[in-house]
Amino acid sequence: MAQCGRAGTEQAGHGELVRSRTAASAGASRTGRLEPSGKKCYSTDMTIEPVQYRISGHNAATVARSIERGVRLGHLQPGDAVPSVRALAERLSLSPTTVAAAYRDLRQRGTLIAHDRSRTVIAHRRDLATRLAPEIPDGAVDLASGNPDPALLPDLGPALASVGPVHRLYGDDPAVERLLDLARQGFAADGIPAEHLAVVGGGLDGIERVLEVHCRLGDHIAIEDPSYIGTLDLVRTLGLIPVPVAIDDEGPEVDALTTALDQGVTAVLLVPRAQNPTGAALSQERAATLRSLLADHPEVLIVEDDHASFISGVPHHQLIGDRPRWAVVRSVAKSLGPDLRVAVLSGDDDTIARVAGRQRLGTGWVSHLLQHLTATVWSSSASDGTLEHATQTYAARRSAVLDAFRCRDITATGTSGFNVWVPVAEEVPVVQGMAARGWAVQAGEPFRLDAPPGLRITVAGLPVERAEDLAVDLAEVLDQRLGTRRG
């Protein structure tokens, strides 16, 4: 039972841009909107600066390219609202279905995002090469970076001292058997076949290698919405098209995955527990339903990113079933430390053989020093209770926050892992309001495709006694900034 209380003129190519300026200071702040006519009005404290960018195109592909060109050249800025589907369709003499298809493709690529029920805007996204971690204001409590609590990670000192200075040479076995044995035990405990294993350089490396050997440029891939930023970036970088699958606290929604499968996706990529950013975890009943659904699509590749397996705090319910193409990747970053760039990949024999073959052409293998270190830390932290203590502490912190939110009628989800997800009407005002009160939280926009707005709050490092303070401040921000605490 929760206890509630407080503890000049220029023209660009294709005739799309016509810009006129009045005398305004170069550094004046401004906000903008793109009207259906193409006229974009910026207001500053000194002047009005009308800018016109005319979206053009004769089909969905050319409309999408026109918008992307405007973004690339800087004429369409993050946060700018694009015209409604109906308004742009009328101006371009196209059907609303055609414009809607262009917008849908741009959302999947991360160029556009649904800001609320009535507006679609240019996404606030950095280039992949320059994407940075969230900025944490001085003195703020970091609930945004997504890191594990350093105090709950095992001490690497004894393990480092025990790793012998033995050189491994070309042609040696790429995997350390001791590490594979530990991984086999974990997979077997969850009913996951472990006859074929590979050691990869972290969770995303494993996902990339599996997708790379099975998918081709332009393939559609079903992915949870919202989903981890790094995963979305990876999928797009590989030239794959993410198909959003709505999720709730029990995992992917059945109707949403059915729709994605009917669209002919090549692969399904999901997080079975400790889902980032929502904290969702597949329930036994949901997993059984989805396995039955997927059984009718045996050609579809299933990839499970079980990144927080040791410390997720809930059982693993898998979707792979008896399939010809599948992979489960388990990283040690969250449980043993992010700097241990090691994960173990289990899969069908063809998938693992392809991954190993491709790995030999690139990195060759994951450093045996890292593998030995990981195996030593893994074994000792399992036997001395470090992993169990971390699991229980993370669960207690997450439960304390959810209970405190519930007492103040703040809707939130999160049954496992490091994060909770709070639906909101608008993200930026809440992030700013929380920062003013000393809390750094993460806006949900980079995680979303079609999902409505929300906040990711990483509670892994938040002491239980601070949960009430967080809830009180968030409730005040939701009431003062948005007039409601329901997203």
Image: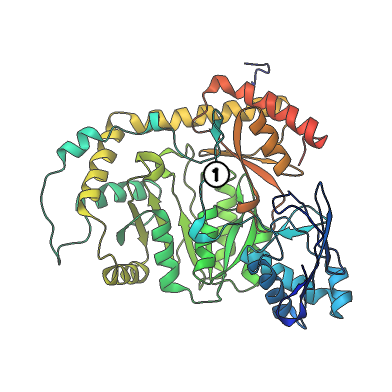
Where is residue 336? Give x, y as percent: 34, 40
- Residue in view at x 45 percent, y 64 percent: 322
Tell me the quarter of the image containing the N terminus. Answer: top right
Q: Quadrant of residue 79?
A: bottom right
Q: Quadrant of residue 388?
A: top left
Residue at position x 67%, y 58% in the image:
123
Q: Is residue 309 visible?
A: yes
Q: Residue at x 55, y 39 (%)?
A: 144
Q: Pick whichever, 290 or 222, lies toward us.
A: 222
Q: Position of residue 72 (x, y in %)?
A: 63, 68
Element under label 1? loop
Residue 76 lies left or right of residue 308; in this view the side is right
Q: Specify whether 108 is left or right of 204.
A: right
Determine if residue 195 is in view.
no
Residue 459 x %, y %? 54, 33
**Which residue is farthest front?**
23
Categorize mark 1 by other alpha carbons within 10 Å: few (<14), some (14-19), many (20+): some
What residue lies at 26% left-to-right and 57% top-to-bottom?
Answer: 366
Quarter of the image with the C terminus is top right
Q: Position of residue 467 (x, y in %)?
A: 60, 24
Please indicate whether residue 59 sits to the left or right of residue 313 in the image: right
Q: For this view, does 429 lie left or right of residue 295?
A: right
Amino acid beneath label 1: Pro
| Residue 429 image-quadrant placement | top right
* Residue nearest the observer in this picture, 430 or 38: 38
Circle 1 sits on which residue? 134
70 or 1, which is in the foreground? 70
Q: Is 310 above or below relative to 468?
A: below
